[in-house]
């Protein structure tokens, strides 16, 4: 507990979240384990709503494929992807107080070495630098021991022989890349296409933060969007090119300012702030998506990663940040241009061919340089080997032969030294029916826990000193609360009956008969329930109920028989609260 | 590959699943890793549908709470729950060929020792038995080395200091038990109530089976239903008591027959085949649930676990089994009466109080025996200590004092020997406002992967030699396929427009324009898409489309404007195919 920050929104939301069952730190009865969070009943529902919205926003309109693979991955796959190398941090323990520290951080803090410089050093070199620069334990001033790598993936072993190392996946993306061959088959060989995986991911963070911000086990939604690097045009761009983005491109960031520039998507592409059309497109969608979760435009921005800040697979990376009360600008999604890095790595490590063949709609004429042997010159030079040389040259790559002749004056065909006079180059027009290539990938990757938290923080407000979650209708964990006005005279029975009917219609309904009606309304407001239905004596006689609006506290009276249909329209945003009945 | 079984349904479904993207073995490009399965796009959707159905069936009607906790759990929690001890198997390696075997299995196979007998032996005793009984390597006949325990949970370490051991959770249930205090608070202290967790679970199986049956990473749905052991009555029982169950209770099983008896739920409880009303109730629901997934009643049964077959936490356990073509009777859910075992264990290990206080609706009069000291007799015997003895006796538990006096003729109050003459017993009527107790739990636990597989196997059929998945409407991964009859004259554009409109209405829609219409229908049948919509030249002139039924191959013609509304009713089972338009 940090008393100085006690009244920030994080503290308020956390207290509410714990008390009402949105989320809380896991394993409290055992003193807690840092970096793990449990979603209670309301939080589980909220998270499901965020995921549903994500699917509606990103997956369905683009016919993306969703996939679910395992959380434990064999080492071989994560070695190929580069994660085994990238997810380790050099650590050293103080010989006096035994505390452990990240060596690169110590070098940065005590010797002003940059993170990049430190990253390049081997364990031996790190030890030498510590010695040379006199880096000491920041806690007790003691001498530091040997450096060792700490793996920030969770390591385990698979099967009874324990020699098969496995890791908890640090991202959902790799589950997609390793299955690319199956996926492209399902997509009938055609790019562009997108694949999504949502689920738990694991990073054994050295210092996890409080709450849902830096967890060791977290929920991720990775979109891998595959496209032809030679046809990188995004056809949906015209729909969004006038949208503006708050952008901090690398060139602005290098000036040590974090003042965002406001540009249209069109301009961001023209100015080369964003290098890939699809990436720009998904960044706009991400901005719109966050807005539907309740985060206004001016609380959002995109900040580019400088080359040394980027993940190992990324050629260009933007973080989508939103403003949170306690943490300031906080990443909620990453937008990386991963190129063909991952597919190539898996191709090289597994031997599986990751190329796709894209047929052109009409065959294309392509100019090609062809190399051919000149037998008249080859015969006299190579004699008995002449035929062999002719065969070798007819299979040779024209570009390579030309390059070698230009640069070195000869070309080696196996052991035979070919001189310029032995070959001739001709240009030929050939018809290409298509092209083989490894698709490139842009990756929008969302942290679901942060999105759910952001929705809560931005929904939080007060009305007449009472807490209110103004969650968008489609995010509210409970859509409708059903309350009997009193607990007698058959009114609870009538309310239960309505509750059941609404559940059957598919609504997320709560039933509550304890406490005064005012207290129940307050409880509903606090968890963001948009509508309360109250059953009273009138209901028994004329089959009408009172509907109450969370945000305005207004009430209308409506017929039970119209309720379900009207509610459906309300939650589809086809009807406003006022149109749900007669104002009381 | 087992050529002899090549034509069984598992082989057929697996081939279809791989080819069309339901599921396949993970990490194929790296030669595969046993025990891991990847859900492709259609499988992911199917699994989501099964989960949605599960929620509609079990969670919503009973206002159960859903929770989501972490997959990695700290060792302390799984030590408390008994899993660290229960999830280990004695293994020994052959000194010759180095292969490793489960020692208990070797003793069973070579020395006819029962699993229970073997389980009770320590590592030393196992070694002695191996020596004594001459158990040898079953592969090469070599001598066996030392026995060691193999942990069948995935082990890892949490945080940078690696001394905090963690495990992948072997069940979702523990995430509920450790959070019981928060959950009962959210349930406002009232039992009965149910909590559900669905998600990935991990067991480092020594020999995982093929396909979705015994996975190392699997999907589980655990219901923990908490109730007062003194008020174990299930109020919903009358709704189901005439339902019949195919039951193999322990007493039948002991006769070495696996012939199920057919009994009503009422009788199963009367005969004490099922000891808990709530357990019986959930078993019927489980049967009904499997039926909605497509598994007929006669392909389902419940088989009781004999005491030594039960999990360490279970007082009574039934497996729900269904008949699968390759594996015969296969468990799809487990129904265990876990009593207060788990809550007690966590209470003892953490010190957290797991009692609930249940207020009675009206205070109850309870007869209580009270013990009181007889000063006239105590004075002479204990002299200076008399006052101390009086105090001790007024605090003593009457039952304990009586029992001791009855059995031994005296009772020890600290160091003082109390004889019958020193005390008197009186009956008193007191008013109890409620009762403190640790709730008991019945646990229905479902294997989601097996359910999804079962739905596929039972949906599979043939019509005119073509494969057809007759999936229930609400399980079909794709609800509607939209096909332009030809790829020209604006027909694809019109089809795309309809596709978009249906997506917007929330349907799971596929668009496909490649291949003949017949081939497209066949592809849709094979993945269980109930309806195909075809757009043709007529559509352009009169805004009607053809709808085609998967199961009957019948076609009707309907207006585009009615489509969305009609489809909603169709998928809610409010309208049959014939009522979707005019028969063609």
Image (cartoon, coloured by chain):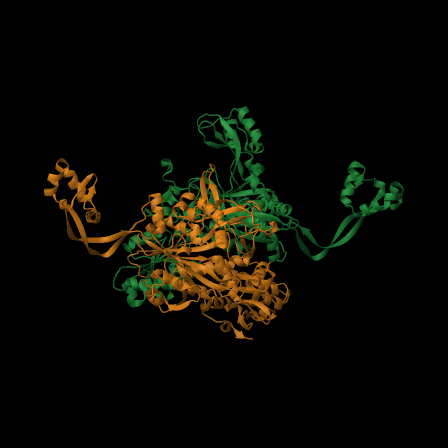
Chain colours: A orange, B green
Identify which residue, B388 or A428, lies in the foreground.
A428
Q: Is residue A146 visible?
A: yes
Q: Can residue B504 be seen in this view?
A: no
Residue A264 left/right relative to B342? left
Q: In this view, does A465 lie above or below A388?
A: below
Q: Position of residue A415 (x, y in %)?
A: 20, 38
Q: Is residue A419 above or below residue A228?
A: above
Extreme bottom residue here? Answer: A583
Identify which residue, B333 or B531, lies in the foreground.
B333
Residue B67 left/right relative to B348? left
Residue B267 position by quadrant: top right
Q: Where is residue A9 in the image (x, y as percent from the top left)?
A: 55, 64
Residue B177 left/right relative to B101? right
Residue A532 position by quadrant: bottom right
Tally the numbered discs.
0
Identify which residue, A529 or B75, lies in the foreground.
B75
The C terminus of chain A: image quadrant? bottom right
Q: Where is residue A24 in the image (x, y as percent from the top left)?
A: 56, 56
The N terminus of chain A: image quadrant? bottom right
Q: Position of residue B366 (x, y in %)?
A: 75, 52
């Amino acid at each position: 507990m940090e008393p100085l920050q006690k009244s920030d929104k994080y503290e308020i939301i956390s207290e509410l979240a714990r008390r009402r069952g949105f989320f809380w730190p896991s394993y409290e009865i055992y003193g807690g384990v840092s970096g793990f969070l449990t979603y209670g009943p309301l939080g589980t529902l909220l998270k499901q709503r965020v995921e549903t919205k994500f699917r509606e926003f990103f997956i369905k309109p683009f016919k993306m494929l969703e996939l679910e693979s395992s959380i434990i991955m064999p080492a071989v796959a994560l070695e190929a992807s580069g994660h085994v190398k990238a997810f380790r941090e050099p650590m050293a323990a103080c010989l006096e107080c035994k505390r452990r520290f990240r060596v690169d951080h110590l070098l940065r803090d005590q010797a002003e070495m940059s993170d990049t410089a430190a990253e390049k050093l081997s364990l031996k070199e790190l030890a030498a630098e510590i010695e040379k620069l006199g880096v000491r334990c920041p806690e007790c001033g003691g001498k530091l021991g040997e450096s060792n790598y700490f793996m920030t993936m969770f390591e385990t072993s698979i099967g009874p022989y324990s020699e098969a190392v496995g890791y908890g996946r640090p991202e959902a993306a790799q589950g997609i890349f390793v299955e690319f061959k199956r996926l492209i088959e399902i997509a009938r060989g055609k790019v562009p296409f997108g694949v999504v995986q949502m689920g738990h991911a694991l990073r054994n963070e050295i210092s996890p933060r409080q709450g849902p911000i830096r967890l060791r086990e977290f929920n991720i939604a990775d979109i891998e969007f595959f496209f032809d690097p030679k046809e990188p045009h995004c056809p949906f761009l015209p729909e969004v090119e006038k949208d503006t983005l708050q952008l901090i491109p690398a060139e602005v960031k290098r000036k040590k300012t974090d003042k965002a520039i406001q540009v249209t998507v069109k301009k961001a592409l023209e100015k080369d702030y964003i290098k890939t059309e699809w990436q720009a497109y998904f960044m706009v969608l991400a901005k719109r998506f966050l807005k539907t979760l309740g985060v206004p435009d001016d609380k959002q921005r995109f900040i580019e990663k400088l080359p040394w800040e980027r993940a190992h697979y990324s050629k260009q990376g933007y973080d989508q940040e939103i403003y949170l009360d306690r943490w300031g600008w906080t990443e909620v999604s990453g937008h990386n241009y991963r190129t063909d890095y991952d597919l190539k790595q898996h191709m090289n490590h597994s031997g599986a061919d990751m190329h796709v063949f894209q047929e052109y709609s009409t065959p294309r004429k392509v100019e090609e340089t062809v190399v051919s042997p000149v037998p008249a010159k080859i015969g006299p030079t190579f004699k008995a080997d002449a035929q062999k040389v002719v065969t070798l040259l007819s299979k040779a790559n024209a570009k390579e032969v030309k390059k070698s002749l230009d640069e070195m004056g000869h070309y080696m065909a196996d052991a035979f030294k070919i001189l310029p006079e032995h070959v001739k180059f001709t240009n030929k027009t050939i018809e290409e029916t298509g092209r083989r290539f490894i698709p490139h990938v842009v990756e929008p990757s969302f942290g679901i826990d942060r999105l759910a938290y952001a929705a809560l923080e931005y929904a939080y407000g007060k009305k007449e000193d009472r807490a209110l979650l103004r969650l968008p209708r489609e995010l509210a964990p409970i859509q409708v609360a059903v309350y009997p006005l009193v607990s007698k005279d058959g009114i609870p029975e009538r309310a239960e009956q309505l509750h059941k009917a609404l559940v059957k219609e598919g609504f997320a309904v709560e039933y509550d008969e304890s406490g005064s009606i005012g207290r129940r309304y307050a409880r509903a407001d606090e968890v963001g329930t948009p509508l309360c239905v109250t059953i009273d004596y009138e209901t028994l006689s004329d089959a009408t109920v009172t509907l109450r609006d969370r945000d305005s506290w207004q009430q209308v009276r409506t017929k039970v028989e119209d309720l379900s249909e009207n509610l459906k329209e309300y939650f589809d945003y086809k009807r406003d609260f006022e149109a749900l009945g007669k104002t009381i």
